[in-house]
Amino acid sequence: MKALRVLFCGVLIAVCSVAFGQTNGQKSFDEMKALTGAWQGAVTLPPDAGHDMAGKTVQVTLRTTSSGNAIMHEMKSEGAKDDPITMLYLDGDRLLLTHYCDAGNRPRMVAKSSADGKTVEFEFLDLAGSNDHGHMAHAVFTFIDADHHTEDWTYMMPGDKPMKAHFELERVK
């Protein structure tokens, strides 16, 4: 009986160490994995945005890939000329995002999860490729419930003028 108690205590300590030892990056990555699936919703842009996504319905697909080591975020909109792809992945103890943009560049952002676990915010880290047409600079994913989330993306236009897009998304699969 004493050996059983010692074994139970050892297992409990090991489980607690793993649970509490999770890095912020791993926690954010796990939160983002919960969004795996197909989503659809409306996009809101400023009235002067002049972008072809304004007022359209978008389809967003998030799927894990690379044996669960990456998440691919793909956005499509009827009539849109681009199909932006964003990859999310762990780099050591941080969650990074690389956005493959139709502007011909690849901004990277680093994640920070809110204390309550309801948002993952990505801050600009660096940029590969040309910045002649601007670049994506910020993203926030807000978890509402298992079937609803929002995404807020900020694009820095030339001259550092931000253009923000807000997506209200509902799970379709």
Image (cartoon, grey):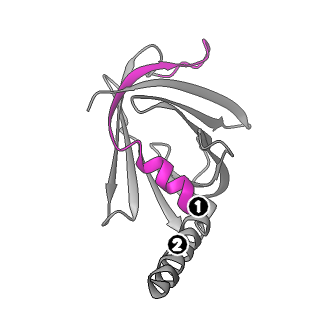
| 118 lies left or right of 172 | right
* Mark positioned earlier in the residue sequence (1 or 2): 2
* Residue 81: image location, x then y, percent: 35, 31
Q: Which stretch appears magenta?
A: 25-51
Residue in the foreground of this view, choosing between 147 and 17: 17
- Within the magenta stretch, is there residue 44? yes
Residue occupying image coordinates x 50% and y 43%: 103
Q: Which residue is depicted at the point 50% across and 56% down?
A: 29
Quadrant of the frame with the C terminus: top left
User: What secondary structure is marked by label 2?
Assistant: helix
Query: Looking at this view, is 111 or 30 the one in front?
Result: 30
Query: Which residue is tagged 2?
Result: 12
Report if residue 131 lies within the magenta region: no
Q: Can residue 114 be seen from the camera position used here?
A: yes
Q: Which mark is residue 25?
A: 1
Q: Secondary structure at mark 1?
A: helix
Residue 69, by quadrant, is bottom left
